[in-house]
């Protein structure tokens, strides 16, 4: 399409990937006839990380965006999360400790090829009425509270300046508005980095070769292992193994830069990634004949950041343009579900003529609090204990139990309006925030003591924690209570050593 300098839109969206396409879809549904322009830099979206959905993002994609049939036909149904632990004593896959479900999962989630998925969301947004300009970049935005915003674009025809009442920043990690306005902050408490690629020739987790080599291992679980997000884990790092429709496997490593020294030699990132994973007995078994796609190798450091402002009267930030915490447990697309739903609600409220200032203040307060508490409760210092089978089994049971109890249950019970309330944003979540933060801090402290005494990994050989899986039934609180009793037992048998000491011991 072409546009001229006089073009005026109701909303201009910077970026046509999932956050941009989803916001456009919601806006068009709530505001028939609204004029939306999506500006997307690329001619064709490429593969990107963010391939594993969890229960909230799957709800959003399936039930809110209405993509369940498409997801079932064109992507993979996911079988939860599975974790693999090792130590110097673990020689092979059969001896590695395993954490995950014994049976298939109870609620839907998917493994996505984002190049295809995001294009489909964008295609449907355009079918519903959004205009798309691509390849084209937004190069400048002049914000004007309560007025039309001025947007400068660059495409094949040169530069153009257009106006719109609202700008939605869905530019992803580029975080265009936050950086331009000086709101962008690196989360220096959480210095993580990642390297990843897509691979061919990764062994089949459920195939005959591994079943014949490790028969006990194969029969210990009734679920399909290969369509889970498998995590091969070590001290201070974890890796994701996400299968994609068609046979490729997305494999990448994330590590805490304070705990792991990433190999710095003359080899390329892909070779170093493979060498790093081949040190782990599970990685070695699965990757031995695998090859990464040399044209699709990526590296990013200091992953965690946030914007200090999320919205004003005329702009709103969604998805990665607003903040990014950590990829562990795949919260990225949950965050997209919450930010895009609230962004569409904010713009719709202004179009209905509602007063804006209090709403905007609430929006900023809500997302600042949610982001900070979500990070502090779940991720702060998690890499300290991530490689410990017993500590991680405990944390996973409790983290997942609280996720089901407080977050996943809400949209299933209350519908889409639950997505207007991001995690930890309401006062009622205060005690849960404090409790989750407390056990995560305690587990980190216990691991620090083990590291100091060179006791890490002692419980990583030949164990299996196969949790039955949570449902939305209130009786599942029993599983949470079991986890809490296990934590108390850990404190009485080991944790007490650190009760009165400072962090390093
Ligand atoms: C290592 C890693 C692993 C992850 N794994 C998961 C996971 O398993 N599950 C999960 O839920 N999340 C995961 N995430 C997070 C997930 O990748 C992101 O949350 C998600 O992809 C963000 O989508 P988005 O639409 O906000 O941004 P993006 O996907 O980054 O899209 C932004 C779009 O904006 C366009 N754009 C940028 N600037 C401009 C401009 N100036 N003009 C026009 N267009 C522009 C770009 O071309 C791009 O298409 C992971 C993140 C990392 C770093």
Image (cartoon, grey):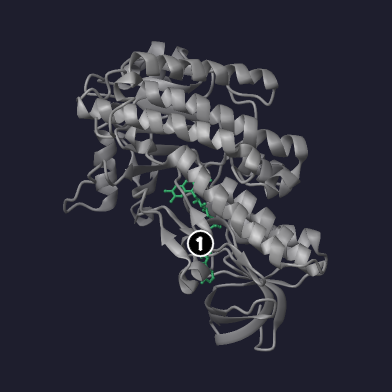
Task: Name which quarter of the figure residue 128 lies in.
Answer: bottom right
Q: Most extreme residue toward the top, as rendered?
A: 216
The answer to which of 195 and 469 lies nearer the viewer is 469
Q: Secondary structure at mark 1?
A: loop
User: Residue at image x 63%, y 20%?
Assistant: 476
Mark 1 nearby-residue class (10 Å; few <14, some 14–19, many ≥20): some
The answer to which of 42 and 443 lies nearer the viewer is 443
User: Residue at image x 76%, y 41%?
Assistant: 415
Residue 45 image point, x, y percent:
53, 61
Residue 259 image point, x, y percent:
26, 41
- Residue that badge 1 annotates: 308
Residue 82 image point, x, y percent:
46, 28
Residue 128 shows up from this direction: no
Q: Is residue 261 above or below residue 388?
A: below
On the rendered image, what quadrant is the N terminus found in? bottom right
The answer to which of 187 and 75 lies nearer the viewer is 187
Q: Judge left or right: residue 341 versus residue 188.
A: right
Q: Is residue 496 above or below residue 113?
A: above
The answer to which of 432 and 284 lies nearer the viewer is 432
User: Residue at image x 47%, y 38%?
Assistant: 378
Task: Name which quarter of the figure residue 234 lies in.
Answer: top left
Q: Most extreme residue toward the left, as rendered?
A: 266
Residue 454 image point, x, y percent:
20, 25
Residue 159 shows up from this direction: yes
Q: Is residue 502 above or below residue 98?
A: below
């Amino acid at each position: 399409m072409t546009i001229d300098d006089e073009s005026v839109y109701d909303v201009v969206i910077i970026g046509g990937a999932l956050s941009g396409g989803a916001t456009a879809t919601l806006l068009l549904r709530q505001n028939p006839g609204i004029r939306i322009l999506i500006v997307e830099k690329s001619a064709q979206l490429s593969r990107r990380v963010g391939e594993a959905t969890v229960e909230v993002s799957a709800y959003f994609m399936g039930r809110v965006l209405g993509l369940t049939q498409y997801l079932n036909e064109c992507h993979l149904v996911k079988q939860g999360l599975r974790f693999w632990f090792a130590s110097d004593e673990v020689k092979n896959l059969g001896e590695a400790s395993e954490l995950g479900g014994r049976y298939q999962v109870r609620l839907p989630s998917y493994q996505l090829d984002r190049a295809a998925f995001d294009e489909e969301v964008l295609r449907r947004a355009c079918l519903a009425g959004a205009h798309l300009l691509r390849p084209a970049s937004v190069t400048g935005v002049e914000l004007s509270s309560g007025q039309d915003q001025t947007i400068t674009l660059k495409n094949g025809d040169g530069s153009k300046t257009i106006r719109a009442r609202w700008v939605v920043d869905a530019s992803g990690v580029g975080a265009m508005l936050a950086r331009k306005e000086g709101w962008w902050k690196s989360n220096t408490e959480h210095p993580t980095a990642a390297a990843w690629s897509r691979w061919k020739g990764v062994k089949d987790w459920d195939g005959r070769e591994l079943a014949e080599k490790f028969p006990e291992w194969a029969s210990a679980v009734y679920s399909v292992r290969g369509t889970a997000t498998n995590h091969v884990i070590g001290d201070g790092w974890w890796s994701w193994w996400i299968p994609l429709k068609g046979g490729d496997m997305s494999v990448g490593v994330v590590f805490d830069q304070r705990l792991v020294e990433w190999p710095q030699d003359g080899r390329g990132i892909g070779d170093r990634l493979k060498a790093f994973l081949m040190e782990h007995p599970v990685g070695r078994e699965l990757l031995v004949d695998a090859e990464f796609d040399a044209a699709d190798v990526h590296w990013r450091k200091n992953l965690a950041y946030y914007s200090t402002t999320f919205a004003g009267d005329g702009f709103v930030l969604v998805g990665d343009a607003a903040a990014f915490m950590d990829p562990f447990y795949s919260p990225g697309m949950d965050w997209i579900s919450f930010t895009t739903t609230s962004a569409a609600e904010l713009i719709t409220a202004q179009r209905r003529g509602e007063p804006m200032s209090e709403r905007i203040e609430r929006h900023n307060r809500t997302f600042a609090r949610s982001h900070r508490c979500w990070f502090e409760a779940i991720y702060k210092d998690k890499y300290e204990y991530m490689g410990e089978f017993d500590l991680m089994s405990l944390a996973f049971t409790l983290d997942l139990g609280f996720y089901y109890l407080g977050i996943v249950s809400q949209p299933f019970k209350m519908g889409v309006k639950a997505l207007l309330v991001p995690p930890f944003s309401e006062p009622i979540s205060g005690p849960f925030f404090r409790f989750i933060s407390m056990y995560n801090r305690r587990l980190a402290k216990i691991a620090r003591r083990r590291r100091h005494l060179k006791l890490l990994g002692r419980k990583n050989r030949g164990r299996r924690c196969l949790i039955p899986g949570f449902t939305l039934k209130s009786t599942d609180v029993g599983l949470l209570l079991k986890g809490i009793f296990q934590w108390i037992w850990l404190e009485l048998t080991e944790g007490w050593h650190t009760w009165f000491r400072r962090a390093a011991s």
